[in-house]
Image (cartoon, rainbow, N blue to C red):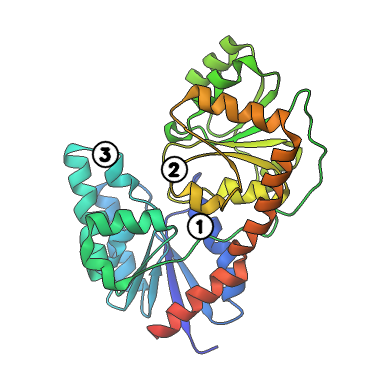
Amino acid sequence: MNLRIIQVCRKPGINFSIEHVFDTINRELEKRCLIQKRCLPYAYVRPYGLLRNLLFALFKCNTITHIVGEIHYAALAIRYKTIITVHDLSFIDLNSGWKRCFFYWLWYYFPLKKAIHVTCISYKVRDDILRNFPFVRDKISVIYNPLDPRFTYSYKKFDTIRPVILHIGTASNKNLERVIEALKSIDCELRVIGKKRMEYVALLNESGINYQYKSNLTDEEIIEEYRQADIISFPSLYEGFGMPIVEGQAVGRVVLASDIEPLLDVAGPNGACFVNPYSVNSIRSGLKKIIEDEDFRNSLLKAGRQNVARFEPSIIAEQYFDLYKTFS
């Protein structure tokens, strides 16, 4: 085990999904090479915190370094070969004015220019990067996120009378408002997992929908929510990947997803009921078809079980290991 890689990640916090992804990868990678994690000391985008993080990267990264997500700017202080993984371009896609300019240059342009290689988690992210930063064309590759192996198949008879619909995420891009509107005429139990937002609580109370709203769940509690669900609701407006789709497929649940990239690619052909996320009627029709059409449900489940094989941690880890060897 002569190959040593430093992985740089954000300061641990509430939103730790990227780091969970690489924990899954590293359990396989550590069979092949030595992985040393370095978590930046500051989480907030303020001058003092940025400077301290850059100094940390300067002195703590003394071999091939992999920045595993979001804190791309740390590459500017690293003196060794640096790989950057980009999960999405939300910092520039969802900002405008001086904020967009700030993130464009400091979070993307200069770090990507300096990196020896750039990986991204979907072809949609790759295309977005190339549209904005064409100079990375000769040093970019796609490596999917892996499925957490704790998400395993769990049989549950589908409840056609009052199905449990699990909606993951409450950020604005997760489209919960349209899901609530679509469910007003459907007898179901909606379970929402994510940060509690009072505007959604008010909408749910007004809707008459039978619901539960849960926050700050452990990984094990989230997996149990998947097992108790009949349908996974994920008609998102914007994603870099869309892991809840694969997690739902792995557990053996029917998935409702947006007909946009990268969700079409991640779900695989016929792996989900695809709907127009901007149309309440489309979301409602998709849910009704899932509930009422058993043959349709079974076809989605079969395609989903076949699709999850693409995201086995050992496959993803092998791709990163090959990349590390290339630059060792």
Element type where label 1 sits in the image = helix
Mark 2 touches mark 3? (CB < 8 Å): no
Q: Give the quadrant of residue 311.
A: bottom right
Q: Write the residue at 40% across / 70% down.
A: 66
- What amino acid is at disc 2? Ile
* Above or below: residue 200 compared with residue 63: above
Q: Is residue 142 visible?
A: yes
Question: What's the mark number on residue 283?
Answer: none
Q: Residues within 10 Å of mark 1 (few under 14, many from 20)?
A: some
Residue linked to disc 2: 260
- Residue 48, given in percent of the width and then of the height, sits at 26, 51
User: Which label sits on residue 19?
Assistant: 1
Label 1, label 2: how many angstroms apart (C-alpha)? 25 Å
Position of residue 236 relative to residue 180, above or below, is below
Dot in front, 3 or 1: 3
Residue, x 36% and y 74% (percent of image)?
61
The residue identified by callout 3 is: 95
> How many angstroms separate mark 3 from mark 1 (CA)?
24 Å
Quarter of the image where the C terminus is located: bottom left
Nearest the viewer among 306 and 246 is 306
The first of marks 1 and 2 along the sequence is 1
The one of 200 and 9 positioned closer to us in this rendering? 200
Amino acid type, label 3: Asn
Q: Nearer the viewer, residue 53 or 191?
A: 191
Residue 191 visible in rendering: no
* Residues at marks 2 and 3, CA–CA distance in whole angstroms: 21 Å
Q: Residues within 10 Å of mark 3 (few under 14, many from 20)?
A: some
Image location (x, y in percent) of residue 222: 67, 42
Secondary structure category for the residue under label 2: loop
Numbered disc 3: secondary structure:
loop
Furthest toward the bottom, the residue is 2
